[in-house]
Amino acid sequence: MSREKPIRVLIVDDSALVRQTLSDIISSDPEIEVMAMASDPFVAADRIRDEIPDVITLDVEMPRMDGITFLQRIMSQRPIPVVICSSLAEKGSETALKALEYGAVEIIQKPRLGTKQFLEESKIRICDAIKAAAIARPRPISRRQTVEAKLNADAVIAKSTTKAMIQTTEKVVIVGASTGGTEALREFLEALPPDSPGIVIVQHMPEHFTASFARRLDDLCRISVKEAEDNDTVIPGRALIAPGNQHTLLKRSGARYFVEIRQGPLVSRHRPSVDVLFRSAARYAGRNAVGVIMTGMGDDGANGLLEMKEAGAATIAQDEATCVVFGMPQEAIKRGAVDSVLPLEEIARAVLRQCR
C-alpha cells in the first residue's frame, strides 16, 4: 500500500546498540523513517505527548517500566500500532505472546550481529512488520526499500504436474495467517470440537515463539495443539503449528498424512511460508483438503490457495471487517482462489461443514 508520507516510527529499547541497529534498518527503507528513539517507556511517553508516531517498536524487558505494562497503557488510552521487538528466547516468549493479547500487532526478533544473509532477512522482516502495523486497526484493550528478489514456493517444492488424488474419507484443514493471526487462530481453534479433522497451520512467527504459542492454544482449546515436528502425523482432534524459521509441508504415505519440516530460503519473504504449505496440500491432499487464509499483510498464501482450489480443495478467506490486515485474504480473492469469504466467527462452522 503506497502512502504520500513515510511511516513514522518511534523506537523504544534500553539498548543503544539495538536502537541504532533498528534505526539503520528502518532508515534503509524509503517508505519508513525514524521519528524518534527512546531508552525506556517514560522517555517514550514524553515523545508521544509531542507527536503521535504511526508505529512503535517496543522491547519487553526494560528498566523503570516493562514493555508489557507500557503496551497496556497505550492500548487503553490511545491505541497506536505496536510491534514487539524482542530477543527473548524460549523462557520469555510467553510474555511476548501475552503482548499479542494486549494488542501488539506483531512480534519480531531483534537483529543480532551475524551473517549478511541473516541481517538482510532481518531487514525484510522488520520493515514488513512495520508496514503491516501502519495499516493495522488496533482496538482499545478494553475491547479485547529495496530487498532481495521475492521467491515463490518453487524454491522449496515443485508444483505438481499430476491430477489431484482420489477423494478419501479423511479430510485435512490447512490454514495460513500472519499479522493479527495469533488471536484469529485462537478464536478459530477454540470453536472446534474435539473430533475436528486434522489441521496444519502456518502462522508467521519467529523461532522459539511457536512452541509457546502452541502450548498456549493447547491450554485453551478442546482439540490438542502442538508445534509441528518432522514426521508428525496429521490426526483428527489435533492442530500442528509450523515451527518458526522452518518450512512445513504436508505429505502423504498411503492413507496417512504427515508433515515434513524443511529448511530453505525465504518464500514470499517468509519462513515458514503459507505458499509452501498450501502447495504441498494441493499436491498431496487435493480435494481432501480445506484451505483457509486469514489476516495478514502481503500475498503469502494467495498463489498456493489458488493451487489448492485448482486441485479440488474447498477454500475460505477471512473477510475484511474481521481482519487486522486484509492483505493476504484480499490477494487470494483477487486471484480467484477463494470459494467463500466469511467473518472470523463463521469460519470454524464452515470448515466443519466442508469436512462432513
Image (cartoon, rainbow, N blue to C red):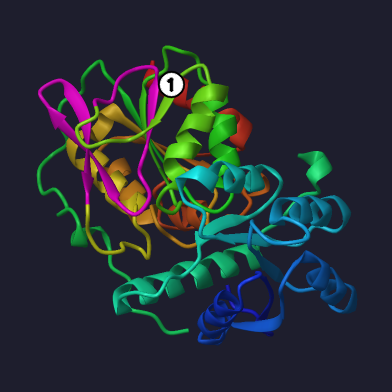
Where does the magenta region start and end? 233-262
Q: Is residue 206 left or right of residue 73?
A: left
Residue drawn at x 50%, y 44% as measured from the top left: 91
Q: Main secondary structure of the magenta part?
A: strand
Query: For the residue marked with disc 1, what is the amino acid?
Result: Ser
Camera-side residue of 191 and 62: 62
From the top left corner, tell me how far across and down residue 306 is, in percent.
Answer: 33, 49
Indicate whether 31 appears above or below 280: below
From the top left corner, tell me how far across and down residue 241 is, in percent.
Answer: 39, 37
Residue drawn at x 36%, y 50% as measured from the top left: 274
Residue drawn at x 31%, y 45% as measured from the top left: 278
Question: Residue 158: which quarter of the image?
Answer: bottom left
Q: Is residue 286 visible?
A: yes
Q: Report the quarter where the N terminus lies.
A: bottom right
Residue drawn at x 77%, y 49% as measured from the top left: 139
From the top left corner, tell me how far across and down residue 331 is, in percent.
Answer: 47, 58
Q: Secondary structure at mark 1?
A: strand
Q: Is residue 54 left or right of residue 310?
A: right
Camera-side residue of 146 and 293: 146
- As for residue 19 lying within the magenta part, the answer is no
Camera-side residue of 225 and 340: 225
Indicate whether 237 appears above or below 344: above
Q: Is residue 170 left or right of residue 321?
A: left
Can you identify the residue that label 1 sits on? Answer: 224
- As for residue 234 lying within the magenta part, the answer is yes
From the top left corner, tell me how far across and down residue 248 is, in percent.
Answer: 28, 44
Q: Report the quarter where the C terminus lies.
A: top left
Q: Is residue 339 visible?
A: no
Question: Residue 32: which quarter of the image?
Answer: bottom right
Indicate whether 174 appears above or below 154: above
